[in-house]
Amino acid sequence: MIARLFAPACLACLACLAACGPSRPDLASRISAEGRAAEFPELVPLAPLLRTSDALLPRSAARDGASLEARAADLRRRAALLRQMDL
């Protein structure tokens, strides 16, 4: 019995809360006259774009790993220099 009364009341409260939210901005008024007069962009087929993305070579894990190891060694060297300083 209470559930039958509670559900519509809850729905009404949620509808009131949604109505109290901020209004949507008027995006059409933000478009300049130049933008309205511009032509639509040219549509490009998707298949050639996907083929070029598949042709990209994967990154070399060995090269990236060596770079990270060099950076870590440099950070360790700098940390050792900072530890030797009198602060």
Image: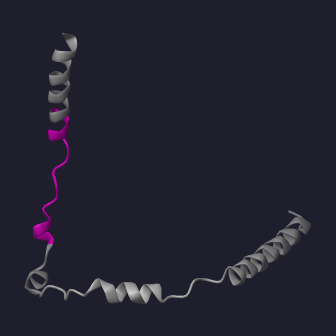
* Quadrant showing the N terminus: top left
Residue placed at 12% from the left, 87% from the top? 38
Q: Residue at x 9, y 81 (%)?
A: 36
Check residue 48 for magenta coloring: no
The percent position of residue 74, horizontal first and vertical second, equals 80, 77
Report which quarter residue 34 is drawn in. bottom left
Above or below, 46 relative to 8: below
Residue 29 in picture, x, y percent from top left = 10, 69
Q: Is residue 80 left or right of residue 39?
A: right
Instruction: Say which residue appears at 78% left-offset and 80% top-offset.
Output: 70
Q: Position of residue 45 (x, y in %)?
A: 26, 86
Q: In which quadrant is the C terminus drawn?
A: bottom right
- Viewer-proximal residue, 68 or 75? 68
At 73% across and 76% down in the image, what residue appears?
68
First to last magenta residue range: 16-30
Quarter-wise, where is residue 4 in the image? top left
